[in-house]
Each structure stands twice: as structure tokens, then as C-alpha cells.
Image (tube, rainbow, N blue to C red):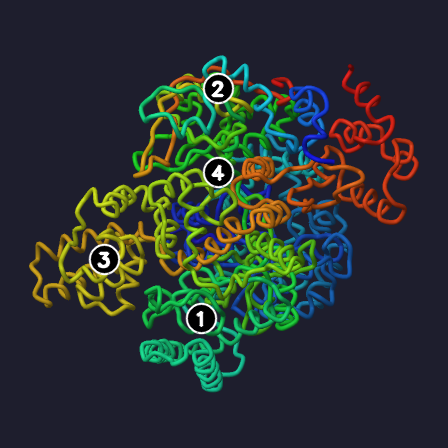
Amino acid sequence: MDSFVHLEVQSAYSFLWGTFTPEELVREAASLGQKAVALTDDGFHGAVRFYLAALKEGIQPILGARIAIWDGSPITLLATDFESYGNICRLVSIALEGGTLPHNLITRQDLSHWSKGVICLAGGRGSTIRSALEKGRMETARAGLLDLREILRDPEHLFVVLQNHASSEGAEHDCADKALQAMGKATELAAELKLATVATNLVTFLRPEDVILHRTLTGIQQRYHHRKVQPLPNDRFFLASGEEMERRVPYPSALAETGHIAALCRAFSLPVGKLHPPSLLGPQEASRRLASLCLRETARHYRPVPGAYLRRLDREMSVVNQLELADFFLLVRKVVDFARTKGIRHSVRGSAAGSLIVCLVLGGVDPVAHNLLFERFINEGRGDMPDIDLDFDSERRDEVIRYLLDLFPRRMAMVCTIHTFKVRSAVRLTARSLGYPLEEIDRLATCLPWSLRGRDLHEALEKLPELRDSPLHHEELLVSLAAKTTGLPFQSSMHLGGVIIAPEDIKAWTPVGTSPKDVPVGQLDKDDVDVLGLLKLDVLGLRTHTAIRKALEILRERGTAPDLDRMPLNDRKTYALLRSTESVGVFQLESPGQRNLLGHLQPRRFSDLIAEISLFRPGPVEGNMVQTYLKRRSGEEPVRFPHPDLAPVLAETYGVVLFQEQVLRIAHVFAGLSYGEADAFRRAMTKDRKSHKMERLKRQFIEGAMAKGHSKRLVEAVFEKAAAFASYGFCKAHAASFAHITYQSAFLKAHYPQAFYLGLLNAGHVGSYPPSVVLNEARRRGIPVYPPHVNAGGTEYEADGSGIRAPLVVINGVGPAMARRIVVDRERRGSFRNLADVVERISPPERILKALSLAGALEGLDEEWTLTREVAGV
Amino acid sequence: MSESSVMTGSPTRTARNEAASMSVFCRGHPLAALRPQLSAHGIATARDLRRIPSGQRVRVSGILVIVHTPPTKSGKRVIFITMEDETGLMDLVAFPRAQVDYAKAIWTSEVLTVEGKLQRQGNRGLSISIVVEKVILPLSGPLSKFL
């Protein structure tokens, strides 16, 4: 066993610097026989995955961060417990927010305030202390260490770092003698100040040969991001063995100190495996209010209230109370109430749409009428927080985020998304790093897909015919580096809609920075949030809601707006439109594959839309379910059930297991599993089929079904079928929720095509097709399309009689500002009379004037024709 | 300013001006201007496809709208292509054999003329696709060159 512990380690989550993932670090440390290892990136983006990987490998995870203090010196901070982890999170947050000092430095006060329980490693490479030691300026080094000892809440947690990165072929600054001298002086000074020394290596790559990858990444920072950053000088910054460290740092006590520090950090753990919801009203009061709200809404929705609804409500409420989730529902209700008050279109997506409580409290499709299963959403067996994903009009989603921010100041932050190099970006950026000119990079990247599903770059070059003649075949170094870069994280950004709400200060859980829109963003991705059991709300933007809202605004002005949210779902014209396969712009049903499926399936009712949305998914397609479903539906093939008991479960899908809810019902009805166990079975089939848990569930399934009197042969056959489809099936509640929006958009297209197209064109990029395809289809359906003109149209597509007028911004070079200038001037001073008038009033640059002319936006004005002819060279 | 009143000059020139100055075609689909020549070469329209029996070999031209390679059960790469002419959208499929010679043209062209076998499926034959056999005329670069 190697007793040395690496305490300063920067992974690829120190973006464009470190070269390995936390998982690779843990594997490598284990292979060296090391019993503990630290991860000390400049933030905590990789912390949770590192922690889990280390526990899995049986290695002690030590978490910390490298931050820069007031004089620009880097220090490494390590957490001894969860509280000190939170303190480091706060210090990283201060650095991210810029603090009171420039260049993201923290002040003495910051460090003093948030250093309780924190271990501080100082005097390493790049610090003022190290530089002073190397130059023999002992007073400066002494002052630096005394300063830190004074400031830290636990002075005994300050350690002086001994590092030796010198290489036999290294740069002058890092020559061996200098390093040895500096270590000697550091040891003397530490003894004088009664501080301990600790040996570290600034690990940035796992193996010496990976230095080239480090240089490639820093090259991207230099040449692509234009940052002033220096790569490390040699290949010594790797995960060295204990023996190697003994050779480099001949101070046994400093080497042994790494083990003592690891022992100090042993009390640290992340609180995984438990839920940490915010406490609002408390379980009892929340339950009372939720029940009362549900009963009120039931009475409002259904008159008289059918017994089935009351029984369902009772069943759902008892599970919600058991899991103490009423607070959570009321919180989401607050968000939805806000959206309703402000007139922001919204909907619930995902398995939550299968809940009657959700339907009553938040809106959506009727789960009883559509036979949706509550237990797919929540059941007694689930240990994680349930997801309620909300879609909002994407242009107004930020209002909802702001509302949440006001509701939970200091407790809320957005989830982050980690971006990794895809093959195309890896090739392009690696080439930039190596100094290739841009035109050459374009040539090299020709035909290179953005990502290579299941293939690496080498294999793609060998097998993809469009890459047969690729110039990349002659670029061995570039290809080899790009292949290594692919998959590494390179930046984080704000998740599209994930909002974390912590039980207390969010910065006790994760460092928090600020987005360009001034929204707090954490360093936990969506999986990390689940692992930590924090409450996550998905507040997503859906452009189709924007498109529908804009269409309805036009119709409201005309007094013809339908009530889309309350209409029956049986309009013949809507289904006829879908059967024609003319579904461009219809939510979820417009892609080439969905249009093709519409031709086959020929929907006639709402349940057909649910099936259509569920069928065209990778799972059903790969599982060959689509053809079987279609043949059985059209009568070309008889409907078969694995067993008569399963007929009620599978009748709606002609004996095909299409929905995840059906897998749960099979396990429940056929094998007598509880819904909690059935859902665990479904999830185990999706994630880890070989797990012990899966084996246990399989045994339970088989024993349960046999206890019901079924033969072993039948039971095994049904199990195999259910298991195979568990990972293919689609969540019916989610499909039903989407199908409702599908119906609404198809209804608008069928009855109000002009408003539908205008909504679509003005909602940003919606769906699969560019505006030109939408305009072409409108024209084919008899809606005239008019070009932009200085005397007509503005910044958005507009209704012009029964036609559509394109906005000025479709003209190359005319941005929103120029378009607004033209519109405002026209509204203020009347139509433009002639070309001279346009030039005088707008002063457009020559190139824009030419584009306006070519586009026909000046047509009808004097002199325009002459200019057009000149420009066209006629 | 009606739609017809702005059709100044020849349709080809109008389309060329639009291609050079705008991100959309307002006065009509650019292939409409070339239809006489395309028809003379036996090139069918998207609308024609609704009348042509399944299994027949057809030639079509269109502006490429979507090219994608979703995952398949077998793991073999299938390229799905959506093109558009002035009468509508057309969906095409290029299997690995066609990809050997034409994958590069498919990924790099703006306008394609393709020969292939028509497939109609579904009770009403409304699910129409063309299995690509040959790419006759790949055209890359700005659309204006073609027009």
C-alpha cells in the first residue's frame, strides 16, 4: 500500500487545464495503491462524481479547491467536514463573483470569515511565499505565512507546501537545485513558525506523456479564448507514486504529513442518499392545505364528482403524506399561480402528468380519463425527490425564474450544464491550439459530423465514406490529440431550466456564480442534484407555447380566439389535417419520421396522438414495436396477449408493451409486485440490468407470478418480455401531456392557418424546419407571402390582409436595430417617398441599401429600379 | 403591393436576387423558376410523388432541409434526408450502399437531384419515401450560383 496521498490535484473540471476526469483519477490512484486522493479544482463541478467514484473504488475522497488570495497567490483549501466544505463553497463563490478585489481574488476578511474547519496548503508553485523562498527573501516568505496563520480560524490547519517539479530537461526556473534549496528554506521557516510541512505535487495529468494534452488545452485558452495563460513547464506534474515522491521530496515528515491530513479529512462526507427538501409549512399543515385545495379543485372540475376521482385522490394523498411531499406540491402551485396571474402559458411534462393531484393543482390532462398511472410518478419505494417539470412560454420563462429568486433569496440557484468536447469541436479547437489557420481548419472539418454516435474519430475516418478523402488522414498528431480531447469537459453554463432550492443557504452546498442575465448558477449538474437529494424544479422554456400565445394574440385582436385550454379533444378537422401528414409546425409531429408515421397511423382520436408520440422514439423503433403496433392496429396481424390476465393492461396498445406504465402494471397484476417494487424493476431494467437489485427483483417477479398459479415457463416468458420493454417503453403521462400541446397546435393550424404560421415564425426557432419551409408551406396553402418593404412590415412577421408580410430583418445585414429605426421613422414621419428620402431619413450604409434594393424592399419608390439594375449588373 | 406585383424581372433573376439578399424566399420557391428545365429532364415534383405507384424509379430535385442519422437497431448508419421543392417536402433514405459514393455529396450540398425507388406505405399510401440509388446533381456553394 502506498501511504502517500496527493492533496493538490486538478482534473479536467479545471476547464482547459487538467487532462483527466475524476473517475480516471480515482482509478489511477487505486492502481498505484493509494488509499486516499484529493480533488482540488478551481471549483466543485466535478466534486460529486469524484466523491461517488472514490467511494465505489474504496478510496477516501478528499475535496477541496484552489483559489487565489489577495496577493494573487494560489492556495489549496481542503474540507475536513461538510461544514468546512460549505465554507470553501462560499470562498469559491466570492472568487466567482469577483469579490471586493479584482481578478477574482479573495480578501483576508473573506478567508478569515469562512475558514472554520478548512485546511490550508500554502507556499506552493506560483505563490509569493514560494517565489520569496526561491529568491532568499525570507522576510517576505515569513510575513506571508504569519499573515495566513493570523487570519485562519484554525491556525493549526495551515501547512507549508514542499514541491519539487524539477525535471532533468526542465526550464531554468524549475531546476533541481533551486527546488531543493526552496524546500530546505521552507522547512526551516516552517519549523521556526511551528508549522508543519507537507509534500505535494501539483497533479494536472495522470501520466507524464499527457503533458501534450495539457499544452493543447492551454493552447485553446491562448489561441481561441485569447487568455493570458502559461502551460506548465514540463511533464513532472503527474500523479506520481509514493516512491517517486520520496525521491523528489527528501523530507519524510512532509511525506507522512499527507496521511495525517487525509486523516483530518476523514470526517468529511457528502450527504448522499437522503432527501433535503426545503421546509416551508411543515408536513401536517402542508398536507391539510393541499387536501383542501384538491377537494376545492375537484368540486370545480367535476360535477358531480365521480367516486373514482375521490378514491384516486385519496390514494395519491396518502402516498404524498407518507413521503411528506405536500410542501413540494404547494411550492410548485405557487409558481403556477404566478404564471397564471401573469398570463404565462405553461404545462406540466413528464411522469407528473399522471397524477390527479398535479392535474388539479397545476393543470394538465385528466389522468383518470386517459388511464395514466400515478405510481410511475411517485411511489412509496422511491427514495429520490419526484420531478415536476414545467414548460413555460420560452419568451417569458425568465419572469418565472425571477419570481423563484424573489421567493427563495439565497436558497436558489440554477443547475449547471457541463459541456464536453464533441468530435467536431475537438478537431477544430485542437487545430486552433496547434496554430492552424482558420481556412485550413474549415477544410479539415469538412464532412466531420458534430458528434459520432458510438464511434471514435479514428474509426470514423476509417469507416465513414464521406471522410474517405478527408485531409485528416494526413494529420496524425491532430487526430490523436483531438481523439484524446473528445469527451473532456471544457466549460459549464446555466442549465436550460433546472432550479435548485436548498433547505438553507445554497452556498453551503455548492459554489454559486452569476450568469450574464444576473441569475445565480451553481456548480451542480442535474445528476449531482439528484445524488445530493436537493429539490430541483425544471422550469423549462417551450417555444411552442410562445408560438401558440402569439397566434392567440392575433386571434384575440380579431375576436376569434378559441379557448384552447378547455376545448374538447375531438375536432374532426384537426385530425383530418394530421392524417394528411401536412404537419409542419405541429408540436412533436412535424419531423420527417413523425410525418411518415402519421401516414401510417392515421390518427382519429386523442389516444392516437399519445401513441404516435410514444411510438416514434429510439426505444420503440429499436425494439421493432412500431411495425407490430401498426400491423395489429390495421388488422394485418392478430392482436395477441402474453396471457389473458394481461389483456386489460395491453388492450389499448394491441398487445404491444408501449408505455412504461404498462410495465409497472404487468409486474403488479401478473406478479403481484407492489407499484414501488414494479417501478424499481423498471428503473433497474433501464439502468443496470446486472445489478444485485435486479436479480432480487427478478426472483420476486418470478416467485410472485408463480404464487398466482402461473407456470414457470409462462412466468419466465412474461418476465423476459416485460424486462425487454422496460427500457424501450415511453412514459405515457409525458406523452399525454405533450399530446395536449400537439392537439392545440394542430387545431390552430387546421382552423387559423395564418395566425398559426405567424405565431410559429415569430417564436424564434421552433421545431425542425427553418422559416423558409414554413413560408413555402403557407404559400402552398393559399396564404400569400409578401417580401419586406420599407413602407410595410417591421421587425416581426405580420399579417397583411390574408397574407404574411416578412419582416425587414430577413434582409441580410438588416438587424433589429436598423429595422426598428425604419419602422419608428415611418410611424413618425409617414411613408418613404423615394430613395433620397430613405437615404436622408435612415442613412443606411451602402451595403444595406443594396440589400434593401435587391430584396425588393425599395420597390415602388422612385429611382429604385435604376439602382436594382446597377447592382444586378444589368 | 400584392405578391404578383413584386415579380419584376424574370423568375430566375428574382430568385437570384432573393438568394443574394435575404434569408428566406418571399416571392416563391426558387425551384419553381427552374421547373420547365427540371420537367424536361423527367424530374418529378413532391406533389407528383403522391400519384406515382410504389416501386417506381423516380428523379427528384430539392433544396436540402434536414439530413440526419438517427440510431438504428442494427447499428448500421442510415441517412435520412428531407428536401423541398415548390410543391412540398420529400423524404429520402440513403442506405450504406448508396452512402459509399454519395455520402459526401449529401452532407455538403445545398441542392440535390436524386434518383431512387419510390416507397409508399400505410393504408392510404401517404407515407412516401425515396430510397436513394444515385445522386445525379449535387450542387454546393451559395444557392445563387445554381440560380
Mark drawn on residue A408: none
A503 displayed left or right of A674: right
A661 displayed left or right of A539: left
Q: Chain of mark 3?
A: A
The first of marks 1 and 4 along the sequence is 4
The first of marks 4 and 3 along the sequence is 4
Which residue is the site of mark 4?
Answer: A207
Residue B38, given in percent of the width and then of the height, sits at 52, 17
Q: CA distance from mark 2 to mark 1?
A: 51 Å
Q: Secondary structure at mark 4?
A: loop
Picture layout, residue A843 above or below residue A663: above
Q: CA distance from mark 1 to mark 3?
A: 26 Å
Which residue is the site of mark 1?
Answer: A358
| Residue A367 visible in the snapshot | yes
Callout 1, which amino acid?
Val
- Which callout, 2 or 4, points to the residue nearer the camera? 2
Q: Respond whether the residues carrying marks 1 and 4 are from the same subunit.
A: yes
